[in-house]
Image (cartoon, rainbow, N blue to C red):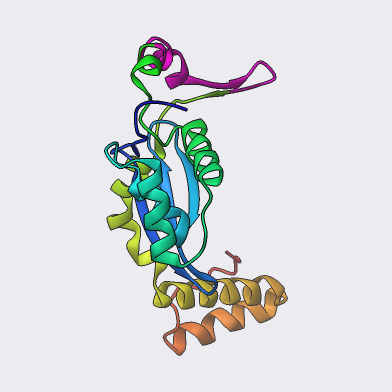
Amino acid sequence: MPTAQPRLRRDLIVSRQELPGGVVYVVKDPTVGRFVRFKEPEYFIAQQFDGATSLEEVRRRGEEQFGASLTASTLEQFAGKLRNLGLLDPEPAQQDQAGATSHTHARVRGNIFYLRFKLFDPDRFLEGILPRLRFVFTRQFAWLSIAVILFAGRARVLPRADLQTFWRKSARDRFVPHLPSTGHVL
């Protein structure tokens, strides 16, 4: 059993989400881009890993908060799982090893049969263009898109003679700007 108390990493990004099944917490590890979903009891216990609180105290708080028994072995397994996922700060002995290998894992991940290269994080790019493209996600844009698709579909289906009549009638009814009649179909 480790002598140092487990501590949840401080750089993790946590998002609380309310779903029909209850509240869940999505934790993002920004160093590797991995997401982990916790139910409320799991997240409560993970929060107790502050580096100063003993596992016995965490176990007692968990039992008190949720009114269910929590064995020491289950809590140790949970802490081990968090450590394997990289969500806990490494112990001092492991920090030296992690510091030596962190540069190799930053750009290349996976194994010999499945290599993943980290080129760039698209979040910054997408967050930058979102203000300019926000109108695309409106109800008005959806209706306009449907109208354009139906208009183009009708123009494609009509025979050529009917299409010229359709264009003249549309221009007269001010649906589209007036186009000169050259006898050519657009």
Residue stretch in magenta: 97-115
Front-most of residues 58 and 171: 58
* Residue nearest the observer in this picture, 37 or 131: 37
Question: For the view shown, which residue lies furthest in the bottom direction?
Answer: 173
In this view of the protein, can residue 17 be seen by the observer? no
Q: Indicate whether residue 176 is drawn in magenta.
A: no
**Residue 114 forms part of the magenta stretch:** yes
- Across the whole image, how many numbered discs are drawn on residues? 0
**Rendering quarter of residue 141:** bottom left
Identify the residue at image location x=41%, y=44%. Answer: 28
Which residue is at the far top? 100
Q: Relative to 147, is 126 above or below?
A: above
Left or right: where 123 falls relative to 172: left
Counting from the top left corner in percent of width and height, residue 172 is at 45, 88
Q: Is residue 122 visible?
A: yes
User: In the picture, residue 10 is in which quadrant?
Assistant: top left
Residue 79 horizontal/vertical position (percent): 47, 39
Q: What residue is rendered at 52% in x and 78% in y? A: 147
Q: Residue at x 53, y 38 (%)?
A: 81
Q: Does 20 sit above or below residue 127?
A: below
Q: Depth check: give the residue in front, 81 or 154.
A: 81
In the rendered structure, the answer to whether residue 125 lies left or right of residue 34 reads left
Residue 46 appears at what percent x and percent y? 40, 48
Measuring 46% from the left and 26% from the top, which residue is drawn there?
A: 118
Q: Position of residue 184 (x, y in %)?
A: 60, 65
Q: Can you say which quadrant of the picture contains the C terminus?
A: bottom right
